[in-house]
Amino acid sequence: MIRPAVLLTLLPLAACMTTPKAEGLTDGSECGDAKAADLIGKRWTEALRAPTQKRTGAQDLRVIAPGDAVTMDYRPDRLNIETDAEGKVVRLKCG
């Protein structure tokens, strides 16, 4: 009888799950990630910081390279720019 009890406990949690978003972009409008979609595939340089921040309206930009330590705090007005080992932008997301 344990199985039905477990199922009844987990079933309401399934209703709270969200569907995964497309890789590369989120729908967060507070950081303007969709406005910078053209950066994906391009090499990130610090010269892009000011124009990217201005066009997206993000309060802060955080560039994350593979292996970088990052905090887990969520800030919807911060644009995270994830790069690969060569410095090319692979993902943009708010947080």
Image (cartoon, grey):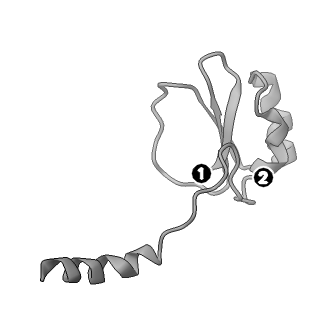
x then y, percent, for residue 13: 39, 76
Q: Earlier in the sequence, mark 1 or mark 2?
A: 2
Q: Quadrant of residue 53?
A: top right
Q: Is residue 45 above or below residue 77?
A: above
Q: Nearer the viewer, residue 38 or 15?
A: 15
* Circle 1 crowding by C-alpha within 10 Å: few under 14, some 14–19, many from 20: some
Between the C-alphas of marks 1 and 2, the distance is 11 Å
What type is the residue that disc 1 sits on? Gly
Report the side of 85 relative to 14 (left or right). right
Rendered location of residue 94, percent (x, y): 65, 51
Q: Is residue 94 left or right of residue 43?
A: left
The label number, if any, that marks residue 95 in the structure image:
1
Q: Nearer the viewer, residue 20 or 56?
A: 20
Furthest residue in direction left, as rendered: 1
Q: Secondary structure at mark 2?
A: loop
Which residue is at a point 49% across and 27% down the rendered structure image? 68
* Residue 95 position (above or below residue 44): below
Left or right, 23 with reference to 5: right
Q: Which sits in the foreground, 18 or 3?
A: 3
Residue at 81 percent across and 42 percent down: it is 37
From the top left corner, tell me how far across and down residue 63 is, in percent.
63, 32
- Amino acid carrying label 2: it is Gly
Q: Which residue is mark 2?
A: 32
